[in-house]
Amino acid sequence: MSHLKNLLAQAKTRDPQLGADLERECNALLEKTRFGLQFERHRPEAVELPSRVPRKGDKVRVLPERGSTQRTDPALWLVKRIVKDGAAKQAEIELIETPPASSVQRPASSVQRQSVNPEDLIVVAEFRDTIYPGLKKTGHVARGGDKPCHTVINGENYHVLKALTWTHRGKVDAIYIDPPYNTGAKDWKYNNDYVEGDDLYRHSKWLAMMERRLKVAKELLNPADSVLIVTIDEKEVHRLALLLEQVFPESRVQMVTYVINAPGQSRNQELARVEEYAYFLFFGDAAPAAVTDDLLNEKTSHNPANVRWESLLRSGTNSRRADRPALFYPVYIEPKTRRIVGAGDSKRLEAPRSEWSVPTGATAVWPLKSDGSEGNWRASPDYLRKLLGAGHIRCGEYRVDEGRGTIWYLGKSAIAKIESQEILVVGKDEHGAVVVKPNGDAEKVRTTTAKTVWNRPSHHAGWHGSALVRSLLPSRAFPFPKSLYVVEDSLRIATGNKPESIILDFFSGSGTTAHAVMRLNKQDGGNRQCISVTNNEVGADEQKKLREQGLRPGDADWEQWGICDYITKPRVQAAITGRTPDGIPIKGDYKFTDEFPMAEGFAENAEFFTLTYENPLAVSYQTAFAHIAPLLWLRAGSRGRCIGKLPPEGWDVAEAYGLLTDLDFATDFLKAVRKAPDLRIAYLVTDDERRFQALARRLPEGVAAVRLYESYLSNFGFANGDDA
């Protein structure tokens, strides 16, 4: 570029007019040239809506016969009309377009028009289409009194994000997402097809998918003070970095490397992988909250109440039984109380476990790794017995069927604090372990800033991700959930000084983010709200089995296996209630920052919804009010009562908002609004702009007026016409 400028300067010297003309043309070309990340922005995505009944004007696809495992023909049809013949119905459809042959696994039909049973059609929404969203309530759990509610929304996340542009534009304090890592192992779909490893456009499809969603997410973040966190692994880490800089040039970006599996995941002809990555983007005045643990160095917390209990099981190098045979022995516990009662002695390397004699009434915990292989402890039997006598060791989660569990002990630095009386021992718990409290002024807590490399056992994905989900949802599996505690640490950095913040996760998966937000609220008494968004996709292997049984998407027996209904909602409910879906108290304890039995649950509230697609005329005529009502409640702060039905009196006032549907009762409505001290929004239904403005001026200070349904319809009328 600098050489070109020199040539232009020479041209201007010889012929000023020619030089000026060349410079003008070069500048025009430069304005059209895109620098940075280059990728194909593929045709707009399309999502199938199995729960939607086809109606005139809908785009649809024709489903294969029941029992067939053949994929749906991707050809798009337009519903021209629905014809009734007694109790039966037929949909007359017309071909819109046939996708390229390369994407069709069977010959596309040459028929241009046909009549089909509506039950054999599935509605399709393309991302360039305008959609008018609603929410259908599908359940709730309430243990938090008048605290605001967490929400879980089942729907295509792009469309849910668009819906949130009306309820939460500029209001979100933090977004945490763990998107598909694009491994090529059927971990995500683009236009209803799994993107596999041999797809030549795998990376550009992933970037196109991410860019569309990040652009909408940008509208939701508070530009003056918010944080975006995106996790990823090595397959897309560098492309993601460029994409984030391109979409969010105003942010301050940092990458964190964190260890998720210290022993390492072996790979053929490759180094053993131990880490993943997280990008932190800070907007406006946002900055990392001060923490007591920098997440890298040996934790030397200056908060005496925060004692680090370390795992007795050795990880990393020299962690096999063969490496240190003398450190392979059983720890004996009393099963019901999980109290440690002793330890076996060391034996030769070849000794089978049956050689150890387990005391009567006790059971053995062995140093076994998550894959069942034999490891070793970090302390000898004699030192363990010394710890036991002092109350410096305890048993955590125990799996009786596997003969393994988590043994925690106090390291030498923690014991030194006790000996120097920096920490005072005030008693022992039911397991015989010491209970401590600060010695002196608790305000002398010293904080620090988290590092950009994290190495904590609490971030182990297997121990505190997969195993934790199994505790909450026995017999239900979810692939590769994040450690609860790595998400908790991330959100503590983002919202530690914002206890009233709104947090969004639109790739919520198993619901770890909502779970972590509840943990933070319990620790500091906060009222953070989490909005979790996921679809109800059924796993690839399970889909084949269900199709062979004659089931289709939309059938109740199909949808019950979807990620939202089978994993996300049950996990959030289990975390709050402390009970599994079968009503059994959850076994095990939470660890680290705040340790208590998982069966205690949380004093939190949650509402569950499914995204719907509304007809704008039905919205205008208020026949769709039941599905619009939750959006009004969300916009008002997701707290208190939701006005779920049109009020027969013409108005209603809840804790957070009011609704006026008949302006003839405006005086009564305004009186009720003035008596509601926590009310912040007044929804006024009118087509008359002058009457709306007149009423808005009469509202108390601090109460915002929103005109229905003009505000709602105009938002989606102009917001959804674009593509990435």
Image: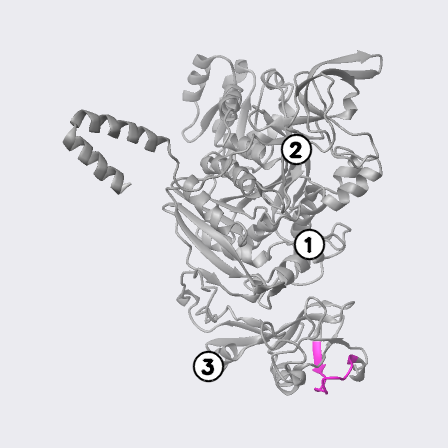
Task: Name which of mark 1 and mark 3 comes first in the sequence.
Answer: 3
Q: Nearer the viewer, residue 407 or 118?
A: 118
Q: Residues within 10 Å of mark 1 (few under 14, many from 20)?
A: many
Asked whether residue 495 is in view, the answer is no
Per the image, the residue denoted by label 1 is: 578
Query: In the image, which is nearer the foreground, mark 2 or mark 3?
Result: 2
Quadrant for the N terminus, please: top left
Q: Which residues are magenta?
A: 340-353
Q: Are marks 2 and 1 in contact (CB under 8 Å)?
A: no
Under circle 2, the secondary element is: helix
The label on residue 102 is 2
Task: Name which of mark 2 and mark 1 comes first in the sequence.
Answer: 2
**Amino acid found under the numbered disc labelled 3:** Ser
**Amino acid found under the numbered disc labelled 2:** Ser
Up the image or down, 603 lies above or below 619; here it is below
Q: Residue at x 78, y 42 (%)?
A: 544
